[in-house]
Image (cartoon, grey):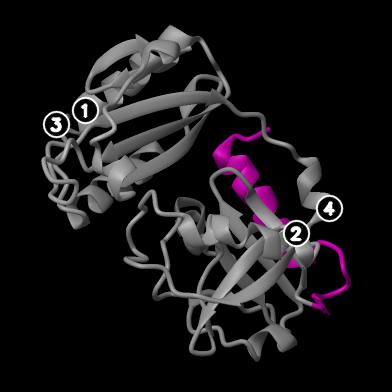
Amino acid sequence: MHVVINGELVLESEARILISDLSIQRGYGVFDFFRTANYQPIFVEDHLDRFFHSANKMHLDVDLNRQQLKEMIQQLIEKNNLPDSGIRITLTGGYSIDGYSIAKPNLLITQTPFAFNKDNFKKGIKLVTYPHQRQLPEVKTIDYLQAIYLQPLIKANNADDVLYHHQNEISECPRSNFFIVMENDEIITPYKNILKGITRKRILEFPEFNIKEAVISLQHLEKAKEAFISSTTKAVLPVLKIDDRTIGNDRPGIMTTKIYNKIIAIGKLL
């Protein structure tokens, strides 16, 4: 398998960056991740928009422009000959002279096999709530400290992931956006203090659904007849349980299923 480091294709086994990089010293860097299906990048322009936005917010310069970056991604896809995959673009803080100052960033592009599992939708997931607000939530940083730290809590609650809330307001899951469906079929998703996902963006563009961005309080969860999450790797997954509360009828709801089918179609997942 090949990867890209600063514009050069190298074997993954030979890929190296120095330990002085701020990504290692301080966990400073940004990334984005998208899928390919039959060699074609999915929603790549949206992902590049977010990648360059994240880099700008973190004061990191990208040596390659958008077109050059797309060309490097295409070269990697062709070199690895991997039709269905996940591609991650990482931009690090660079080789800092003092372990604290931003330096010239290192740009890494990696590719891994990815197969979408349609059976996950039927199973649904359980979330456990936890009070936390991510730093710089609008930026896709490499900092997943809290999410990884909470893995024992998630397992202890027989859950699949954690749902963050702060000052009584729901925000997001560590790697996905959150939605609820109310009794009148109105769909609500948090609009502030979150990373705005690409799948979330597409869902908000569906004209046939009554979807809005608004505050979701912890009390809203008691009134929700459906809930679901969205992400690049999961597409749409129904949330069947939050803490000890069952959502709906403990099976994927009608609205969630309709949105899932539409995302599957436009994302060319199956």
Q: Are marks 3 and 4 in contact (CB under 8 Å)?
A: no
Q: Which residues are magenta?
A: 244-270
Q: Residues within 10 Å of mark 2 (few under 14, many from 20)?
A: few
Secondary-structure class at tag 3? loop
Q: Is residue 258 above or below residue 18?
A: below
Mark 2: which amino acid? Answer: Lys
Q: Earlier in the sequence, mark 2 or mark 1?
A: 1
Is 263 on the left-hand or right-hand side of 193? right
Q: Nearer the viewer, mark 3 or mark 4?
A: 3
Q: Nearer the viewer, mark 2 or mark 3?
A: 2
Q: Earlier in the sequence, mark 1 or mark 4?
A: 1
Residue drawn where x is 44% and y is 12% of the image: 13
Residue drawn where x is 26% and y is 31% of the image: 107
Q: Which mark is residue 63?
A: 3
Mark 3: which amino acid? Answer: Asp
Q: CA distance from mark 3 to mark 4?
A: 43 Å
Q: Is residue 211 above or below residue 52?
A: below
Q: CA distance from mark 1 to mark 4?
A: 40 Å
Q: Are marks 2 and 1 in contact (CB under 8 Å)?
A: no
Q: Which quadrant of the view contains residue 136?
A: bottom left
Q: Which mark is residue 123?
A: 4
Depth check, front residue: 117 or 225: 117
Q: To which residue does mark 2 refer?
A: 155
Q: Nearer the viewer, mark 4 or mark 2?
A: 2
Q: Position of residue 263 (x, y in %)?
A: 60, 48
Q: Residues within 10 Å of mark 3 (few under 14, many from 20)?
A: some
**Does residue 250 show up magenta in the picture?**
yes
- Res 176 visible: no
